[in-house]
Image (cartoon, rainbow, N blue to C red):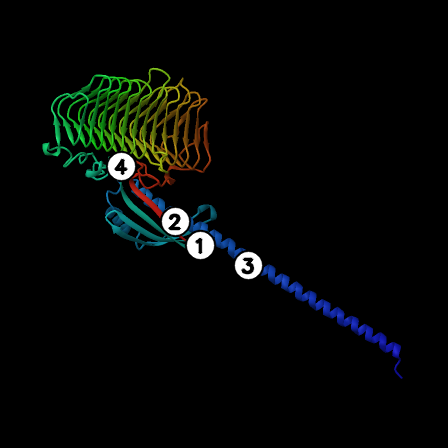
Amino acid sequence: MVDPNKLLKNNEKGSALLWTLLISAVLTILALTLISFNVTQSKQNSKSETLVQEINLAEMGIIDFRNRIYSYLLGDPGPSSIEDITNWVTSNYVGQTFDEFIPETNNRFGYQVFNVDVNQVSESQLLITFKSSGITNSSSVGKTLTNIIDIQASSGGGGDPGSGGGGGDDPIGGGDGSDWGPGSGGDEESDWDIIEPTNPDTNTYDGNTLFEENVDLDQSGENVVVNGHAKFEQDLELSGYQSSVTIEKDGLFEGNTSLSWSETSIEVGGNAKFSQDFNVEGWKGTLSVGEDAIFGGDLNFSDTDSSILIEGGALFNGDITVSNRNDHSNNITVLKDAKFNGSITLKNYSTINVGGPVDGNACSANFYGPISLEGYQVGINVAGNAHFGSTINYVDRNAEMFIDVGDTAVFMDQIWVRGWLGSLTVNGDAYFATPPSIGNGSSITINGNLYMDGNTPNGMQVYGMKQPKSDFTGSLTGTYGCTSSGGSGWDISDDVQY
């Protein structure tokens, strides 16, 4: 006979074993689920990390190709038309694929640019479309981005001849101002509504006006107002206190132009072309030009608190000398692109400002002659890119001389940065054909990459990478263009599609 107590004990052992097996199975399932989740999460994290790498690399490809386009647009000689750009892109990149790898990654990571296409929308607009893919190993092409670069021709500050501008004959883009003024540029007598054969007193001329003889406003408060275009065939001098010339549209000055007395002024609403020397010899002399300007001769300041303001681009073909009699300031300001072909000498409290900032513009400046900074707090500000084709000399025993560049700067000759607190600051990349000389108490600051052979001199601070000159991909002959629409040259924008 079966013992009931023994049977109960066996049942209890069986029940305990069943619960043990059940709990073990549940724990095993939970462990396997957790392991599977971790593996899946790890794979997802790895995929996400790879995707981010591919996007970053693809963006590097977009920047590289965009810079190639920019370098061509800003080159010398650059394109003169949208058709030139179309032909250049077609011959160099359409139908081509190029890969670039990062040497520091043993050529495992890089990008590929391909499917380049051009669409010339009109004579003044071009669309360049291309794709860029990130490469996370040498045999695998990953995430692809598409970019569309929109290039439009900008006429600078000029408007059409009938609206106060001179046809937009942009001097920085190679124009000579020959179509400024009325009709065919004011060369025909029939272009002028009024011909003034003698030296005028205070007067208002309602129409395009030609002044045939020397004009000297030698009386205090004499004012000449031209409601139209104006041309001065001989010298113009403002030698009377607070005398002035106001021109609604373009002003053509074929002789020497002089602001010879205190608080004299010339105001031109359109473009202005000064074929000979321009002299500012009086206290608080001012020149204001609403659009573009060309200075064919030398530009000289010899008194104080005087200024020149060009709201468009400007071309300076002669030498510039800006000096003071005391500690007051003189300045030249160009709100868009500027090109300086002659030498520049700046003395006490004198400054040259190019490229804004106005309405977001950051325009460029080209300096092809030697620059000499010779006084206290003298300097040059460029909001955009800058090209310096000759020597730059901070004359010793002066203080707080400076050059500030908002973007990339190229220095093609020797530079001497000296004096107490003398400074050169470049907020983008900098290219030096020759290592600069830096005196005690002076400094050079490069906030981008430095492209220079040889050792970095004492007093130079570089926040980017130092690379050999041969790695520089920008233009070594000149820079041109504004970073926002409204500047002269080419207006450029792009749209990256992820």
SS type, badge 4: loop
Mark 1, residues whose alpha carbon is within 10 Å: few (<14), some, or many (≥20)? some
Q: Distance of mark 2 from mark 1, alpha carbons?
A: 19 Å
Lateral position of residue 324 relative to residue 48, left or right: left
Q: Counting residues from the N terminus, which is met first, the one under dot 2 or under dot 3?
A: 3
Q: Amino acid at mark 4?
A: Gly
Residue 251 to residue 29: above or below: above
Distance Cα–Cα, label 4 vs label 1: 49 Å
Q: Are marks 2 and 4 in contact (CB under 8 Å)?
A: no
Q: How much space separates mark 2 and mark 4, taking CA atoms?
A: 31 Å
Q: Is residue 209 above or below residue 158?
A: above
Disc 3 is placed on an element classified as helix
**Left-right relation of 278 to 467:** left
Frontmost of labels 1 and 3 is: 3
**C-alpha distance separating marks 3 and 4:** 57 Å
Question: Is the residue marked by circle 3 packed among few (<14), some (14-19), or many (20+) residues within 10 Å?
Answer: few
Q: The residue tagged with tag 1: helix, strand or loop?
A: loop
Please give the residue where the numbered disc 4 appears in the rendered image: 157
Inspect the image, locate mark 2, and give the three-letter code of the amino acid beneath it. Answer: Ile
First along the sequence among labels 3 and 4: 3
Q: Nearer the viewer, mark 4 or mark 1?
A: 4
- Observer-side mark, 2 or 4, equals 4
The answer to which of 361 and 60 lies nearer the viewer is: 361
- Residue 62: which numbered mark, if any? 2
Of the two numbered discs 2 and 4 on the same chain, state the one appearing first in sequence.
2
> Residue tagged by mark 3?
43
Mark identifier at residue 138:
1
